Amino acid sequence: MSKPRIAIVPGDPSGIGPELIAKLINDEGVQDAANIVLVGDSHLWQQGAEQADMPVAIATLSEDEIDAQQGLNHLEMDTIETSEIEISEVTVAGGRSSLRCLDKAMDLAQAGKVDGVLFGPFNKASMTSAGLNAEDEHRYMARYLGFEGYHSEINVLDDLMTTRVTSHIGLKDVAENINEEGILKAINLANDTLRRSGNTRPSIAVAALNPHAGDNGKFGREEIDILEPAIAKAQAKQMDVTGPWPSDTVFLKAKRGEVDAVVTMYHDQGQIAIKLLGFERGVTVAGGLPIPVATPAHGTAFDIAGTNKANVSATRQAFDLLVRMSKNHRAERDA
């Protein structure tokens, strides 16, 4: 199979995104793994090269030439003036640039011109000030693509994925939002995403909601009444799913490599564990969208922006995962 074509977006111009992309495309094996289209203003890539003290020599191509594009190329954008870039600052101009570059990458993917999209870290405050008009960039992308199916953020660390049944809601509202349908959707999302990344038989553990998995109903009946029936339905579909496991031990199984994914019930239940296991390598996948999209899980790191201190590990992890997902996505699309 020929190399997939990946669109790369710089992220917020005020953060570490341009620096990270410069380091990524200079990392060993990256340009051998995929044909890369850098989507953004040329001066942003030059900014990243200067911040990283690394060369970024790229040829500019037109949108009509992308279908036959090979190697490393650049699709010119005009989203922000150099005078508008304020390193380490939340700005409307930075948010507007982020959205316009992301929109173009989505357009290319939707048209089948690229197989996947990687973006540098965005700043939600900047994007919101520029008109994000969504809870986060994942919901923004779904709306932009006109996608109405189930989708959710997936967090990845090396070979481990986590999905969650509830996300950005108050802890007091979690229990009433736990239901069989939501659990099955989170299980299916983990299973489908792992299969798309090349794992043909994923093993998935489901975390309990209550302490000690409810201790036979002593600390709550959600495990008995909701989680166990949902897991049984997933198993009936021949999925390798187990649980509910006490949430204070399920990540020990994950750390030992006994499972490929953990489905958690709420945001911090999985986020705390996976960030402790390897924050600097974490990746976020826009799970469920019709195109593969990935980004490093960390933020724009305004505290070190422009200082050549950004660690490229998570960006490289995101790129490698996206290459695998994009190959399978293209095979499915062309079948």
Image: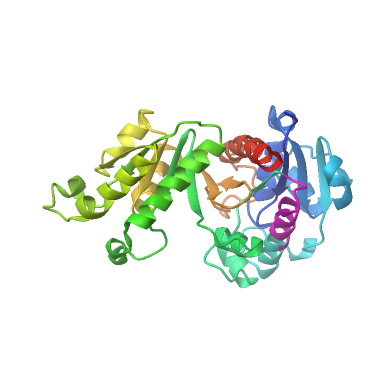
Q: Position of residue 273 (x, y in %)?
A: 36, 43
Q: Position of residue 278 (x, y in %)?
A: 45, 38
| Residue 15 among those drawn in magenta | no
- Picture quadrant where residue 179 is located: bottom left
Is residue 219 in view from this perspective?
yes
Relative height, residue 248 to residue 31 (above, below):
below
- Picture quadrant where residue 1 is located: top right
Is residue 266 in view from this perspective?
no
Q: Residue at x 70, y 32 (%)?
A: 30
Q: Residue at x 70, y 51 (%)?
A: 9
Q: In the current view of this chain or complex, which residue is farthest to the front?
A: 236
Q: Position of residue 67 (x, y in %)?
A: 83, 44
Left or right of 214? Residue 69 is: right
Left or right of 278? Residue 115 is: right
Exactly how many numbered labels are in the figure? 0
Q: Position of residue 108 (x, y in %)?
A: 75, 52
Relative height, residue 257 to residue 209 (above, below):
above
Q: Residue at x 35, y 48 (%)?
A: 264
Magenta-colored span = 100-114
Viewer-proximal residue among 310 and 27: 27
Give the position of the C terminus as an image quadrant. top right
- Picture quadrant where residue 13 is located: bottom right
By secondary structure, the bulk of the magenta-drawn segment is best described as helix
Render colour scheme: rainbow
